[in-house]
């Protein structure tokens, strides 16, 4: 049976300190509260206790309504609290606590009571969510979010905001943001970050949501592009979390997975006609989400990366068969000849890629530090970023009127983030108010991160690939000494012959993808089953005629 504690009282301390929870619980950071719609999830084992509590810090004028707090049990039954209203005294609290009768996930949902603006509410809340042993010992690392939203209290910055990010492929990162002021800020981490929403390809640089010439360049969470949000923990993830859990909605989600290398299998090319170089490229990928490279050796020299070759980034967001159309053009925009030995390669040159996209952060004086906690040794704290496009008014209409800046605009080769990098301070901004201006402001653009999505990312170098060849089909001219009537088969000395590419050993590194196609075994790929059967029959007749001529 649930124990419900609702108190209406005035806290003796400021609202921000109203909840005194153990350090191992998932709690608000110093000078931080909640005032936005979101969900938290906590896994508990049978016999353990789930507990969640919220307390009013203050009212703010930039939102309306109060918080509706709902706890959804593993069996989908619900408990709600609406007693922290705008007229309630500071310190008014709601708390939920019960022992779990079966292992499962509890969800805490917050939403605003004003139907016109449910995404935010005017009552800011301190919070604590935890799992406990039967003896009341707090179990750390059991609570996570996939879209965490935070409110800075007044003008005080958050000294340290620490989060741990878990990827579906088993990698764990520790993230710390120092001397942060985001007013209302949002944190969601994934394999893509800022993308071109028209193609869903990661652009590998920061973006702005001011009026600009590139409205399609946005954080992937603001698009319809498919992706898997990574899990945000508020302590190191517990080692006893299951591989997968079922949410109260009935949906199953991954939790702590072993680190596995990606594999590429089943790579194939199907031309639009038997000899065409345009068509469909199919393959399957497992243990991977992120950006892969589709490469075409268009000049038949056995080397990828030449001036006539093609390389296109592709977004991989699902396991199973993936299909990509290919237009048959080379890197110079010319049709690839059917007489060229074309090769196709799918390359994954990095794994464990996580984009820490900071949405509308006005101040980050201490910078960002990220450390990978597992996987291969080396480059555990390496961080990448690229803010250079933000200097162009085409990308950001406030590019030239920012009152603060970041000292290093880009880190394309990676920088050790130990101690904090890629930060920005007040600069010429006089106060927090000047850091925070509207996207339409034409006089002051605010702090460097204001009205922007600042993308930072990490990765692990890798080399997983699969390659196939699409051999040329060449029909030599008929021997002039042996004239033939139209429609008569060619001289058997010169049959249609597929040519293998020079020095291009087809390979599938580290996986069981499609093997090389050579000789007559390649013909089904080029001509289709019916045409191949006809050609094999024709070759058999010609060989028989030659044998009879040699005997006679």
Image (tube, helix red, strand yellow):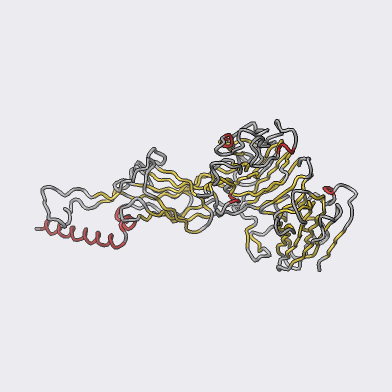
Foreground pick, 452 / 454: 452
In the rendered image of this protein, does residue 285 appear above or below residue 393?
Answer: below
Q: Is residue 527 left or right of residue 508?
A: left
Q: Is residue 66 left or right of residue 270?
A: right
Q: Residue furthest right?
A: 12
Q: Is residue 490 left or right of residue 552?
A: right
In the rendered image, which quarter contains the C terminus?
bottom left
Q: Is residue 77 at all visible to an observer of this figure?
A: yes
- The spot of residue 522 in percent (x, y) is 32, 55
Q: Is residue 108 left or right of residue 279?
A: right
- The spot of residue 161 in percent (x, y) is 73, 44
- The spot of residue 275 in percent (x, y) is 30, 53
Give me the residue at 71% from left, 64% from top.
104
Q: Quadrant of residue 399?
A: top right
Give me the residue at 79% from left, 53% from top.
123
In the rendered image, which quarter contains the N terminus?
bottom right
Give me the residue at 78% from left, 49% from top.
60
């Amino acid at each position: 049976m649930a124990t419900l504690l609702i108190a209406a009282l005035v806290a003796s301390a400021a609202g921000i300190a109203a909840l005194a929870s153990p350090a191992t619980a998932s709690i608000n950071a110093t000078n931080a509260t909640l005032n936005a719609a979101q969900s938290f999830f906590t896994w508990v084992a049978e016999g353990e206790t789930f507990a969640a509590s919220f307390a009013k810090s203050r009212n703010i004028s930039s939102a309306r309504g109060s918080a509706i707090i709902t706890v959804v049990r593993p069996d989908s039954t619900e408990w709600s609290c609406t007693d922290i209203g705008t007229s309630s005294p500071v310190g008014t609290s709601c708390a939920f606590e019960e022992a779990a009768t079966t292992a499962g996930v509890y969800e805490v949902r917050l939403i605003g009571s004003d139907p016109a603006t449910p995404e935010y509410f005017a009552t800011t809340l301190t919070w604590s969510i935890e799992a406990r042993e039967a003896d009341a010992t707090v179990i750390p690392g059991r609570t996570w979010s996939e879209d965490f939203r935070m409110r800075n209290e007044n003008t005080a910055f958050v000294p340290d905001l620490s989060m741990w990010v878990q990827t579906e492929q088993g990698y764990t990162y520790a993230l710390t943001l120092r001397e942060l002021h985001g007013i209302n800020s949002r944190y969601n981490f994934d394999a893509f970050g800022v993308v071109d929403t028209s193609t869903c390809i990661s652009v590998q640089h920061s973006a702005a949501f001011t009026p600009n010439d590139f409205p399609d360049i946005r954080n992937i969470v603001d698009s319809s592009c498919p992706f898997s949000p990574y899990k945000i923990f508020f302590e190191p993830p517990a080692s006893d979390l299951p591989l997968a859990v079922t949410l109260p909605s009935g949906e199953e989600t991954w939790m702590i997975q072993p680190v596995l290398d990606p594999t590429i299998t089943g790579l194939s090319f199907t031309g639009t006609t038997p000899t065409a170089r345009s068509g469909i490229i199919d393959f399957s990928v497992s243990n991977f989400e992120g950006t892969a490279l589709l490469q075409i050796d268009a000049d038949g020299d056995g080397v990828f990366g030449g001036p006539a070759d093609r390389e296109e980034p592709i977004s991989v967001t699902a396991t199973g068969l993936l299909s990509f159309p290919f237009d048959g053009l080379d890197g110079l925009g010319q049709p690839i000849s059917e007489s060229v030995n074309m090769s196709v390669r799918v390359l994954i040159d990095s794994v464990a890629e996580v984009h820490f996209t900071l949405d509308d952060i006005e101040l980050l004086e201490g910078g960002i530090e990220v450390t990978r906690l597992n996987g291969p040794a080396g480059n555990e704290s390496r961080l990448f970023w690229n803010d250079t496009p933000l200097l162009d008014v085409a990308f950001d209409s406030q590019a030239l009127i920012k009152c603060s800046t970041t000292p290093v605009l880009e880190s394309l080769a990676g920088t050790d983030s130990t101690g904090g990098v890629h930060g920005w301070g007040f600069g010429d901004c006089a106060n927090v108010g000047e850091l925070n201006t509207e996207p339409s402001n034409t006089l002051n653009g605010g702090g460097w991160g204001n009205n922007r999505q600042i993308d930072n990312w990490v990765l692990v170098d890798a080399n997983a690939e699969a390659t196939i060849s699409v051999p040329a089909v060449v029909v030599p001219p008929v021997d002039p000494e042996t004239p033939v009537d139209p429609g008569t088969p060619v001289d058997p000395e010169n049959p249609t012959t597929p040519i293998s590419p020079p020095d291009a050993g087809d390979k599938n590194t580290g996986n069981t993808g499609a093997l090389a196609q050579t000789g007559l075994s390649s013909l089904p790929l080029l001509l289709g089953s019916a045409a191949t059967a006809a050609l094999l029959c024709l070759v058999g007749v010609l060989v028989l005629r030659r044998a009879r001529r040699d005997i006679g």
